[in-house]
Image (spheres, grey):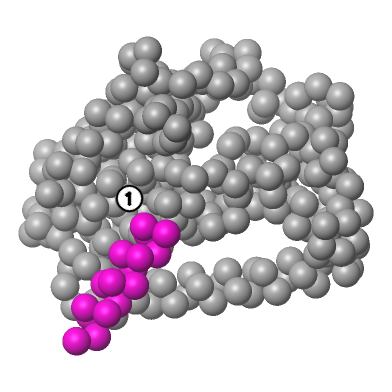
Amino acid sequence: MTYFWIFVAMVLLALCGLTPLGVSAGGASRWLSLGPVNIQPMEFAKPALVIYLAYFFARKQDKVQHFSIGFLPPFIVTGALCVLLMAQPDFGGAVFLAGILFFMCMVGGTRLSYLVMAGGVGAWAGWELISSSPYRLKRWTAFLDPFASAQNEGYQLVQSLYAFGSGGLTGSGLGAGKQKLFFLPEAHNDFIMAVAGEELGFIGLSLFFLLLGFFLFRAFRVALRQEDLQDRFTAFGMTLVLALGFVLNLAVVLGTVPPKGVAMPFISYGGSNLVASFLCAGMILNISREGST
């Protein structure tokens, strides 16, 4: 079933980016319409990739440090998914999958020299993709100095920073925020935490971070306690999917990484991300129950 799920993910991504079945919005085709329901295959490609990588590294531990056996296959599979994402195009999604691959390779036992080499090639390819696309390059320059283009490319990030700044210590109160009143674009999706920062303030967000840290601590602890290697890698990978979503979303809304549509797991509006997040949490919980018997 491992290869079945990665195959399904590839087919869904191909249907999105390479066929008329994909639903276009905002200059990209990242959704599939199934009657009244739209799904975003990228969200389900994340756990599918984790399942494949966990199976691969658990079965190839004795050969994982060989270039042709332990390095090339997972990079080829992940690269194929990234190519399909770029056809949509979804540069941020490809970077997310590359991040999953990198950390899974680290815990899986891949040689550090191979990872450094792959990281260098990936950084070069990423910069080429950014510099060759006027849209991506504008996002990069807006990230470096958002207030220099506060009415254009930097508008969303500037409004996000205004939201956090106006929240102060205790916030304006739940429902009393002003930035969500059409000042901050995508306030209910990718920038939901800016709204939370305005309404809950520093104290409220600090409590959120404590809960988030406790959740991730417990999830990584589940992974560490597994005796079965595949279960350990699977639990780690599912936790990683959620952790990367948490960290990248907060990094974007705080202006510490270039703007990219990354949903906040369990909180952002969006059915596909919510279902995929609960899928990851459910698999972690199931592994924890099996490991305790």
Left or right position of 25 against 40: right
Left or right position of 41 against 184: left
Residue drawn at x 74%, y 66% as measured from the top left = 205
In the figure, 59 relative to 214: above or below? above
Q: Residue 222: where, in percent of width, then height?
A: 34, 76
Residue drawn at x 30%, y 30% as measured from the top left = 12
Q: Quadrant of the C terminus?
A: bottom left
Q: Residue 264: where, in percent of width, then height?
A: 58, 52
Q: Residue 70: where, in percent of width, then height?
A: 15, 47
Front residue (pair 112, 263): 263
Main secondary structure found in the magenta portion:
helix
Q: Look at mark 1 in the image and give the residue it sits on.
A: 47
Q: Residue 113: where, in percent of width, then height?
A: 30, 46
Residue drawn at x 90%, y 61% as measured from the top left = 172
Tell me which segment is drawn in magenta: 278-293
Magenta span includes 291: yes
Left or right position of 25 against 48: right
Magenta span includes 114: no
Quadrant of res 246: bottom right
Q: As shown in the figure, which amino acid type bears the numbered disc 1?
A: Pro
Front residue (pair 42, 55): 42
Within 10 Å of disc 1 (Cα), the crowding (few <14, some 14-19, many 20+) is many
Quadrant of res 121: top left
In the figure, 148 relative to 268: above or below? above
The answer to whether any part of residue 172 appears in the image is yes
